[in-house]
Image (cartoon, rainbow, N blue to C red):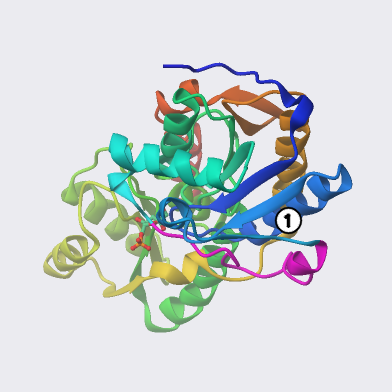
Amino acid sequence: MSTETSFDAQHLRRIGVMTCGGDAPGMNTCIRAVVRTALNYQIEVYGIRRAFAGLVAGDMERLGPRDVGGILQRGGTILQTARLPEFREERLQKLALRRLHEHEIDALIVIGGNGSLRGAFMLQQRGFPVIGIPATIDNDVWGTNMAIGVDTAINTILEAIDRLRDTASSHQRALLVETMGRKCGYLALMAGITGGAEVIHIPEVSITLEEIARRVEEAYIRGKTHAILVISEGAEHRTTDIARYLEEQETGFEVRITILGHVQRGGRPSHFDRLLATRMGVAAVEALRRGTCGVMTALRGREITLVPLEEVISHERKANLEYYEIAQVLAR
Ligand code: F6P
């Protein structure tokens, strides 16, 4: 087993790149940055389609500069993506290594979230040089302030909240807005605080249905014409259960639900995501050229740094609860 973070990059001639897990706005921008940076150093790039599933099937082709033209502003991923939980099986990892060797690929760049970075680490442990780039709207990857796609997704949620408030106010309603995020409340918390939510419900904070109803009722008593509740999909109470409870409690507001769903994952990447994806794509290729591997690119402060993949996958990233307190005060 090897978790080496360096390799002999003297003969680095060809790298593979793939996008994995849920797609995130900015993945295309990142592919473009990887391809054009590598080509600038006469390193060939193979685009692997459909993530680890495509890798074990040997589904890949060489990418030239024109193949990544006109994609930096497009959501989704031109390489497509897939989830393959079975990749933890030794058989599939060995098959993946065989495909990489068949195509004479010297190193791999994996763009994706926690599951993808775990898959990347498995290949690294088998001695294949890998670099991870965090890309997931959930922002649940440890070690980086931001993953690619988060900023765009929050802006999409904010636009929805702003629109929903218009109609909620007109009808004196409580509007429950459910966001994605799995077990991390980052999206809901940040959209909630910047969208002026009356209640934010995230997995990191336990709260009773009674307390939620009390906050909504207080908003009504204070003369608010609406109540916006931002609920993370992985939180303690399900959105439908909260809605039912609020209806029973007669808080003063009529109740409606909006589940934002996959709309949060699509769309043109924001300026922030384009820049982050570009910087991380460039940093990944530069690291490989220096012979560094087994790491993930990370945003710390304003700098792009490298964090060992082993550290990344052995920690859990949670939402910053300082913001939760602030949001509660500002909701009054
Ligand atoms: O990890 C990104 C994410 O969008 C989560 O927020 C969500 O729970 C999940 O993916 C949905 O996955 P799928 O698109 O496979 O249904």
* Position of residue 161 in the picture relative to residue 213 (left or right): right
Q: Nearer the viewer, residue 141 or 192?
A: 141
Give whichever of 214, 201 is nearer the camera.
Answer: 201
102 in the magenta segment: no
Question: Residue tagged by mark 1?
Answer: 274
Q: Secondary structure at mark 1?
A: helix
Residue 152 image position (x, y, % from top left): 61, 60
Whether residue 147 appears in this view of the structure is: yes
Total numbered circles: 1
Amino acid type shown at disc 1? Arg
Q: Quadrant of ligand 1?
A: bottom left
State the predominant SS element of the stretch in magenta: loop
Label 1 CB sits under 8 Å from any ligand 1 atom = no
Residue drawn at (33%, 37%), measured in percent from left and top? Answer: 204
> Quadrant of the rendered structure where residue 280 is?
top right
Taking the spot 75% from the left edge, 39% from the top edge, the residue there is 13
In the image, 190 versus 101, the foreground residue is 101
Magenta highlight on residue 73: yes
Specify start and end residues of the magenta stretch as a single range: 65-82
Q: Is residue 113 visible?
A: no
Q: Position of residue 12 (x, y in %)?
A: 74, 34
Q: Residue at x 42, y 66 (%)?
A: 224
Q: Quadrant of the N terminus?
A: top left
